[in-house]
Amino acid sequence: MIDSAIPIVRKAVFPAAGLGTRFLPATKAQPKEMLPLVDKPIIQYGVEEVLESGLDNIIMITGRGKNSIEDHFDVSFELERILEEKGKTDLLKVVREISDMLHIAYVRQKEALGLGHAVLTVRELVGQEPFAVLLADDVIDADTPVLRQMLDVYEATGHSVIAVEQVKQEAISSYGVVQIEPWDDKRFSGPVYRIHDMVEKPKPQHAPSDLAVVGRYILTPAIFEFLETTPRGAGGEIQLTDALRGLARREPIHALRFQGRRHDTGDKLGFLQATVELALKRSDLGKAFREYLKTLPL
Ligand code: UTP
């Protein structure tokens, strides 16, 4: 049920100006968001999730050396002409589809001063509206797109929503972890909580829960006020988590334990796992790939 008093989320922001150091040397001259998972760049999975969730306004935050992201989502007249001449209509459809369906604006983050700093650069473009933030390297394979699952919670409450996932104790110190209380509402795709506080990369014994923040957020525009006053933390970076802690003290923020399988493709092992799992699910490749895997002396 949509409450007409709740402002609509229209824009999805993709911060893609990070340095991608975990994936060097592949990311020395190309953005990690453009590494292919099977046959699509990582960021296209996120963009398709946005479209399937009912949004088509995208803001990309890019940095140095990220032109290939703009080129990928732009019209490629030369390529389209060649495909047309050769009668390759299937491929033509594939390259055309994505640029036809989207409105994309690009903003430069001049220095990689952290995720919080990146989000602050879109303040003018977003304006006084709620908006979504997707970190493309979290690729989430789900029956209902995770952003859609989150929008359902937002549209019923008007509150910010953060996607969380249960994480094993030994891995918890790689994540932001939420301190929560249950929020008794059975309307949604997974359990929903109210966030009281968040801790960035806690030691396992200090983690307030086993629920880690993953790269999907719906934020009210009040977040910008907190980002503006958030001091630079470790490495001179402005952390989104610090601003979210402030926001959680002022207004409710919900955590949604989403339905779906997440892959951290910004990490080499996560990237390999995603490649294998997504290839196995493909109708055109899965069977042959499975047969091949069975021949490996594992
Ligand atoms: P990460 O923590 O994954 O950092 O950023 P990174 O630089 O991309 O990669 P590693 O850890 O060095 O390998 C989380 C998200 O925030 C964006 C990144 O592009 C990624 O989507 N980000 C990070 C920015 O847009 N700007 C920044 O200054 C930092």
Image (cartoon, rainbow, N blue to C red):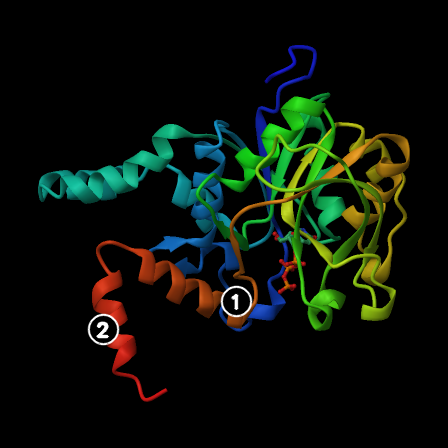
Q: Is residue 38 visible?
A: no
SS label for mark 2: helix
- Please give the name of the residue rendered at 74% of the width and 34% of the height, measured from the top-left corner: 184
Residue 103 to residue 117: above or below: above
- Direction from residue 285 to residue 264 in the image, left or right: right
110 left or right of 142 in image? right
**Badge 1: few (under 14), some or many (20 or more) residues near its Cα, within 10 Å?**
some
Q: Position of residue 126 (x, y in %)?
A: 66, 27
Q: Circle 2 is placed at which residue position?
A: 291
User: What residue sits right under mark 1 in the picture?
Assistant: 270
Q: Indicate yes or no: mark 2 CB to ligand 1 under 8 Å.
A: no
**Which is nearer the eye, 29 or 136?**
136
Residue type marked 1: Gly
User: For the residue carrying disc 2, how many other residues have a C-alpha within 10 Å: few (<14), some (14-19), or many (20+)?
Assistant: few
Badge 1 element: helix
Position of 157 with respect to 94 (left or right) is: right
